Amino acid sequence: MAIKISNQPAQNNRYFLSKWFITCCTIGFSVGSVCAFFLFSLNWVTQYRDNHSWIIYGLPFAGLIIALSYQRWGNPSSKGNNLLIEEYLHPQRRIPLVMAPLVLFGTLLTHLFGGSAGREGTAVQIGGAIADQLNRWFNFGKTERRILLSIGITAGFAAIFGTPLAGTVFGLEVLLIGKKRYFGILPCLFTAYIANFSCQLWDIPHTHYPIHELIPPLSLNNIGFSLIAGVLFGLTAWLFTFTGDFFSIQFKKIKSPLLRPVIGGIIIVVTVVLLKSTKYIGLGIPMIQEAFNNPSDYYDFLIKLVLTTFTLSAGFKGGEVTPLFFIGATLGSALSVFIPLPIGLLAAMGFVAVFSGATNTPLACIVMGYELFGLQPVIFIAIACLVAFVFSGRKGIYVAQKGGIKEKLYRRLNL
């Protein structure tokens, strides 16, 4: 009697591997290419605004267009990154594809007319929206869809900053603080490198922030100085979240969502005119680069903090991360007058530590510190990121996040 051996398990394995290979490649190349277009367009609108500073007077009108577009096509896309987190935690519906063009268009308008915003939120939303469309091709289960959303977030982050390792960790860590949800790490890592490579194919350069001084030895004094800096970075992250919440509450008192960015745009224009400077609007990359070489003014980080939280609370589009880089780098640079650590090292520590505290992603920020600044300063960066994470308060800028380790820590401390 012959024994019949079924090849069904082998066929299932081939289907499983083929499905995820196609998924990762599709998301990686498409998100990387869209992010390349976004970076190119962002550079163009920034240069145009810098050469035609009068255009900032059109910011209220740009805000009205953004509000109208989201009112007409955007619901529920207006939730932004929080929608991705909500769908990860409690799946209900597919992320609308319209989120990608809406946030891209809105971010470019915000930067063209002089709003203070970033680019990470845009890239992450583009990645999440594109990734979730693959549910139309494959029947993903609940766990698989979570991996799918993680992959999309990872691809957007990796492509926009050129940091595939940090993008991988961020895509997993941002969704559940402190939870070990690493079952999707391989597809996320694979997709992150494809997205980064895809973006590089379009010859779009990423900004570099070199540390020119020698990194000091890891002495007790230097560890103590790093701890002090980390506390200040964490408190600044808390202030960013608090200020954003405060402005959001004030703008919600304006009944019409169409009027919020118009009124906000007028106030921003008046503020820029009174400051007699445009260095705090847009991404602020020249100010970040300068912070690594010369001490920033003590008020630079505060002005950027207020302008960014005000811009985003008013309804303009963009991310928070690059402004958080600005805030952290200029604060670290200013602290070099008081803390005897190299200015470039303090700027690098603040660059990622304020981001760590505001987004509750310390591991991703440590990895980003390694990818951007090399191995030598990693210990100092890790100390600053972890301390900032602890001292930044219970919640971060993504209200849909769940507390995890941080929430347990604050409960034990009765805070």
Image (cartoon, helix red, strand yellow):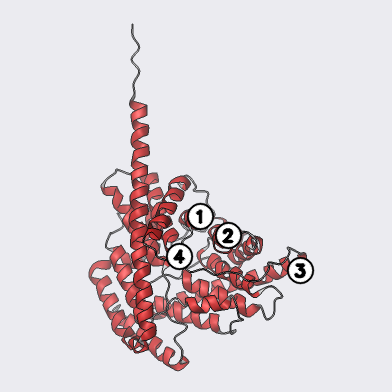
Residue 231 in view: no
Q: Indicate which disc, 3 or 1, sits on the residue closer to the N terminus.
A: 1
Question: Mark 4: which amino acid?
Answer: Tyr
Q: Quadrant of residue 399?
A: bottom left
Q: Residues within 10 Å of mark 2 (few under 14, many from 20)?
A: many
Q: Indicate which disc, 2 or 1, sits on the residue closer to the N terminus.
A: 1
SS at badge 1:
helix
**Residue 325: image location, x then y, percent:** 52, 71
Q: Which mark is residue 398?
A: 4
SS at badge 3:
helix
The reply to whether callout 4 and callout 3 are in contact (CB within 8 Å) is no
**Residue 375: image location, x then y, percent:** 62, 59
Q: Indicate which disc, 2 or 3, sits on the residue closer to the N terminus.
A: 3
Q: Quadrant of residue 257?
A: bottom left
The reply to whether callout 2 and callout 1 are in contact (CB within 8 Å) is yes
Residue denoted by label 3: 221
Residue denoted by label 2: 370
Q: Indicate which disc, 4 or 2, sits on the residue closer to the N terminus.
A: 2
